[in-house]
Amino acid sequence: MLKKDLSIIYYINKLFQSEAFLKSIPDNFFNDIDGKIVKINLKDLPYNLMIKINDNALLLIEDEDKFDVELIASPVILGMFIITKGSEQFSSKISINGDIDTANKFNQFISSSKKLRELASNVLGENLASNLEETFSKTISSLQGMFKESTSDIIDLLTDDLNVIPTKHDVNKFLDDVDDLKSRTDKLYKKYSYDK
């Protein structure tokens, strides 16, 4: 493990605790989830992300046994959940342990485009936040279209395959026809074998 003063968490916390960042967060912005610890367990990665929300500030903490809610998801699912502002398609794939009330408030916070827009505007500036929101909107539209198209393509493929796959009746008829053809071929063979 890295020395504490050289870890990524240290630098992220230094950013979160900087005067400029703290001033950019509107008053009572994290009111609904103040005093809570949210553990984000990223599947397929050896890292857990622990976020402590306290006095209208964020703080990443090392693994701690006590947390209010734990969200378990793959990084892709969690990222898509945040980008799509809490889409049901992705939220159903996130496991939740702990306080459901805190989980719902955290979900509402992430799903609230107004809250995220306000935070982005204060931290990044109005122009950059607007450009970022426009880029995310285009990305979300593209991803939703891709998921919708791929779902319909899979359904079409399966439907077409079901039409091509023979039924039990078709298979039995084919086997009967093969037996009949074999029988007639055997008769012809015998007939011509005796004639020679």
Image: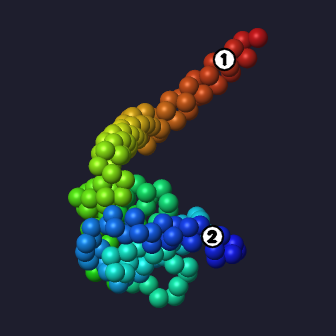
Neighbor class of circle 2 (other Cα within 10 Å; few <14, some 14-19, many 20+) is few
Residue 110 drawn above or below residue 70: above
Amino acid residing under circle 1: Lys
Is 100 in front, or is 68? Answer: 68
Q: Is residue 49 visible?
A: yes
Is 13 situated left or right of 37 in this image? right
Tell me which residue sits at (28%, 80%) in the image: 101
**Residue 191 numbered tag:** 1
Secondary structure under tag 2 reads: loop
Measured in 3D between alpha carbons, the distance from the residue under mark 1 to the one under mark 2, in whole angstroms, is 90 Å
Spot occupied by residue 171 in the image (x, y as percentages of width and height): 47, 38
**Residue 73 numbered tag:** none
Residue 154 drawn above or below residue 57: above
Q: Which label sits in the foreground, 1 or 2?
A: 2
Is 129 situated left or right of 37 in this image? left
**Residue 7 numbered tag:** 2
Q: Earlier in the sequence, mark 1 or mark 2?
A: 2
Q: Residue furthest right?
A: 196
